[in-house]
Image (spheres, helix red, strand yellow):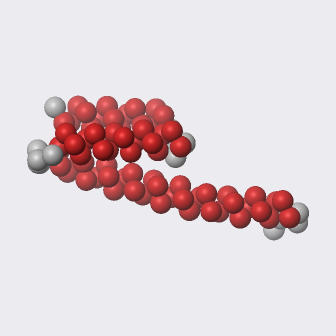
Amino acid sequence: MASHASAVKAHRQSLKRQQINREQRSRLRSQLKGIRSAVGSKGENVASDLKAAISLIDKMAGKGIIHRNAAARYKSRLASKAR
């Protein structure tokens, strides 16, 4: 266990940030699952769902929750499936 007050606080902050990142990553994965099923079934509103998914992917990459190359890969694969 940390022995300095600053180390205790840093640990507390890291746990909080870890939880937030986990929630955000889960939200992203749920969105990706939804858009993949919509694209696969060629459902309605695919274009708007795709736009929302790409926006969310960009936000997650910007915050560092996913790597920028992973974000590019996700967007590329979604776009190619949507065609």
The quadrant in which the C terminus is found is: top left
| Percent x, y of residue 18 | 59, 58
Q: Residue at x 19, y 39 (%)?
A: 47
| Percent x, y of residue 58 | 42, 38
| Percent x, y of residue 74 | 35, 38
Where on the picture, by quarter, is residue 75? Answer: top left
Q: Looking at the picture, does residue 82 appear above or below residue 8?
A: above
Q: Is residue 74 left or right of residue 22?
A: left
Q: How many marks?
A: 0
**Residue lying at the far right of the rendered structure:** 4
Q: Is residue 74 left or right of residue 19?
A: left
Q: In this view, does 58 lie to the left or right of 39?
A: right
Q: Residue at x 40, y 32 (%)?
A: 72
Q: Is residue 25 left or right of residue 81?
A: right
| Percent x, y of residue 28 | 39, 51
Q: Residue at x 81, y 68 (%)?
A: 1
